[in-house]
Every structure is written in structure tokens, then in C-alpha cells.
């Protein structure tokens, strides 16, 4: 969360008056997305399972003068998602942007993968994304506009040993993105995915140093990405500049997969 408004490629008011929901906003990529959307004028609802963690980010953003609403919600629980959408509407009266960013990993080679680790990753990363998407469609269709941005992964495009559950969920998100884009395009709603490569966050901190060095060799730009790199792509897809783009997957990966 280092880039200032002055350095931003986007005008400070590009999303002025818009309301955005960012899931998984308590740290990493989601926190950077929330900050970026605030910087360009959006009111942002921050969601994660931990009320404390999401409350801390909200306090920081509120201290900078931004309008934010922290909400503890587990996106894998349909009832939580319905409450999240209902409270957003009652606070801001509309939802213009949904960023489905929350995600987890439970890595293991498929031969040894436990059913519960398959289920947990699919339920959060894919079903949770579907719950949030389905829940915002009615308000977005009513207002005849909306932007849905799903955070997938290059692992959903290329696969990765030890991540069959995660790869399946992230590939599923790309299919969900395309199908939804076709269903709601005529209603003024765009639906796109972003496929980050290796971005330095808590999620990637678990990867051993030696494997990180090997991964670096696969990246033409020879550096890992920052959460702000993904946030900038989200900001573009949420803005008017991307009005004619839907059903696409934008890779933010330093050229890792092509
Ligand atoms: N980092 C990378 O290199 C990379 C690459 C490609 C794609 N991605 C994707 O980018 C997204 C963000 O990744 P990250 O690296 O920032 O991960 P992270 O640091 O682990 O953060 C994950 C966020 O999701 C929230 N979350 C997890 N399960 C949730 C649930 N059931 N309901 C609501 N919130 C939930 C977490 O908060 P709580 O724990 O408080 O719920 C946290 O805010 C994920 O979808 C990830 O798959 C990351």
C-alpha cells in the first residue's frame, strides 16, 4: 500500500461516487485493492473473516479520509454473503463494483490430497466467488451497470504441481467469469478476471526460498509482483476506460505465463 495518489496513473476522481466491495481485504492483494479504489474516489466495503483484521485496515483508510465499511463475512457461507450485500445496499444504496479477491490455499500432491482440503479450497475460492457474484447481479441489473472483477491466478491457466485443488478453483473462476459475462453483458455489466503471477504477500511467503529463486528464473521481468500491480489492473477494469472489455482474463505476472 505504498503508492500515493499523486503517483497514481488514474485521476483521483475516476471512481468518485461508486461503491465497491472487496472480499479478502484484510491484507495482501485485497488490502492494496481497497486502498487503490479509495484513492480514486470509491466508497469501499472491506470484507474478511476476521473482524479485527478488516477493522484495522478500515481504521487506517478512514484515517486518510476515505469512506469505508468493514464487514466480517465468510464468503464460503451463503448467509454471510447475503448479509454482506444487504448491509452494503442499506449503507450506500448501490453496488457498482465487486472484487472477488478472497482466496485460500491447501497445497498437497493430488495422490495425498485430503477430501477436506479439496472441499475447502473449492468452497471458498470458487463457490464463494459464485455466491458473491450471484448476490450482486440483482442490484446491478436493476441499475443497468456494474463491474465484477474476479481474482483468478496463472495457476488456473497453466496448472501447478501440488495445487490441483487451487488450480481447479482458479480455472473454474475463469469459466464462471466468461459465462456470467455472456449472461449479463446486455444489462450493462462487465465481468472480467485477473490472473496474477507471483505476488509478494503472506500467501507466497510460505514458499521456500530455493523454490522462490527457481520461480524468479521463469519470470521474464525477473522480479516478483507487488499487491499494487494487481490493484492497478483492478482499477483499470473498474474504470470507464475498460467499458468495452468483458469476459477477459488479464494476466499480471511479469510475463511468467504466455
Ligand atoms: N499472492 C500471489 O502470488 C497470488 C497469485 C495469484 C493469485 N492470488 C490470489 O489473490 C487473492 C489474494 O491473495 P493474497 O496473496 O493477498 O492472499 P492472503 O494474503 O492470504 O489474503 C487472503 C485474504 O482473503 C481473506 N479470506 C480468506 N478466506 C476467506 C473467506 N472464506 N471469506 C472472506 N475472506 C477470506 C483473508 O482474510 P481472513 O483470513 O481474515 O478471512 C485475507 O484478507 C487470492 O484469491 C489468491 O488466490 C494470489
Image: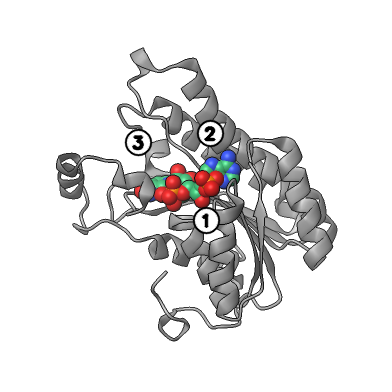
- Residue under the image location 76 percent in, 52 percent down: 85
Of the pair 152 and 78, the residue shown nearer to us: 78
Closer mark to the observer between disc 2 and disc 1:
1
Give the CA separation, mark 3 to mark 1: 28 Å
Q: Quadrant of the N terminus?
A: bottom left
Q: Is residue 257 visible?
A: no
Dot 3 or dot 1, earlier in sequence: 1
The x and y percentages for residue 181 are 65, 47
The x and y percentages for residue 24 are 54, 51
Q: Quadrant of residue 105?
A: top left
Badge 2 marks a residue whose secondary structure is: helix
Closer mark to the observer between disc 3 and disc 1:
1
Of the pair 177 and 54, the residue shown nearer to us: 54
Badge 3 marks a residue whose secondary structure is: helix
In the image, the residue with mark 1 has its CB under 8 Å from the nearest atom of ligand 1: yes
Give the CA separation, mark 3 to mark 2: 13 Å
Give the CA separation, mark 2 to mark 1: 24 Å
Dot 3 or dot 2, earlier in sequence: 3
Badge 1 marks a residue whose secondary structure is: loop
* Category of crowding for the residue at label 3, using alpha-carbon neighbours closer than 10 angstroms: few (below 14), some (14–19), many (at least 20): few
In the image, the residue with mark 3 has its CB under 8 Å from the nearest atom of ligand 1: no
Residue 60, label in figure: none
Left/right of residue 18 with respect to residue 50 in the rendered view: right
| Marks 3 and 1 in Cβ contact (< 8 Å) | no
Residue lying furthest bottom: 6
The x and y percentages for residue 11 are 53, 83
Left/right of residue 210 with respect to residue 232 in the rendered view: left
Disc 2: which residue: 172
Disc 1: which residue: 26
Above or below, 10 relative to 137: below
Disc 3: which residue: 158
Amino acid at each position: 500500500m505504498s503508492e500515493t495518489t499523486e503517483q497514481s496513473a488514474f485521476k483521483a476522481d475516476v471512481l468518485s461516487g461508486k461503491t465497491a466491495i472487496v472480499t479478502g481485504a484484510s491484507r495482501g492483494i485485497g488490502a492494496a485493492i481497497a486502498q487503490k479504489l479509495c484513492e480514486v474516489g470509491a466508497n469501499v466495503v472491506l470484507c474478511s473473516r476476521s473482524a479485527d483484521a478488516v477493522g484495522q485496515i478500515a481504521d487506517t483508510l478512514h484515517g486518510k479520509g476515505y469512506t469505508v465499511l468493514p464487514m466480517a463475512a465468510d464468503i464460503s457461507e451463503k448467509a454471510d454473503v447475503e448479509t454482506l450485500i444487504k448491509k452494503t445496499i442499506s449503507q450506500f444504496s448501490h453496488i457498482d463494483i465487486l472484487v472477488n479477491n478472497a482466496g485460500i490455499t491447501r497445497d498437497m500432491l493430488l495422490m495425498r490430497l485430503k477430501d477436506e482440503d479439496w472441499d475447502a479450497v473449492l468452497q471458498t475460492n470458487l463457490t464463494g466467488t459464485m455466491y458473491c457474484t450471484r448476490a450482486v447481479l440483482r442490484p446491478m441489473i436493476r441499475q443497468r451497470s456494474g463491474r465484477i472483477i474476479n481474482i483468478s491466478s496463472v495457476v488456473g491457466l497453466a496448472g501447478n504441481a501440488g495445487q490441483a485443488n487451487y488450480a481447479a478453483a482458479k480455472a473454474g473462476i475463469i469459466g464462471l467469469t466468461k459465462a456470467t459475462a455472456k449472461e449479463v453483458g446486455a444489462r450493462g455489466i462487465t465481468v472480467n478476471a485477473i490472473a496474477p503471477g507471483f505476488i509478494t504477500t503472506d500467501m507466497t511467503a510460505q514458499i521456500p526460498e530455493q523454490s522462490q529463486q527457481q520461480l524468479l528464473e521463469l519470470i521474464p521481468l525477473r522480479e516478483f509482483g507487488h499487491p499494487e500491480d494487481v490493484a492497478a489492473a483492478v482499477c483499470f477494469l473498474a474504470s470507464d476506460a475498460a467499458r468495452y472489455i468483458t469476459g477477459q482474463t488479464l494476466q499480471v505476472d511479469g510475463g511468467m505465463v504466455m
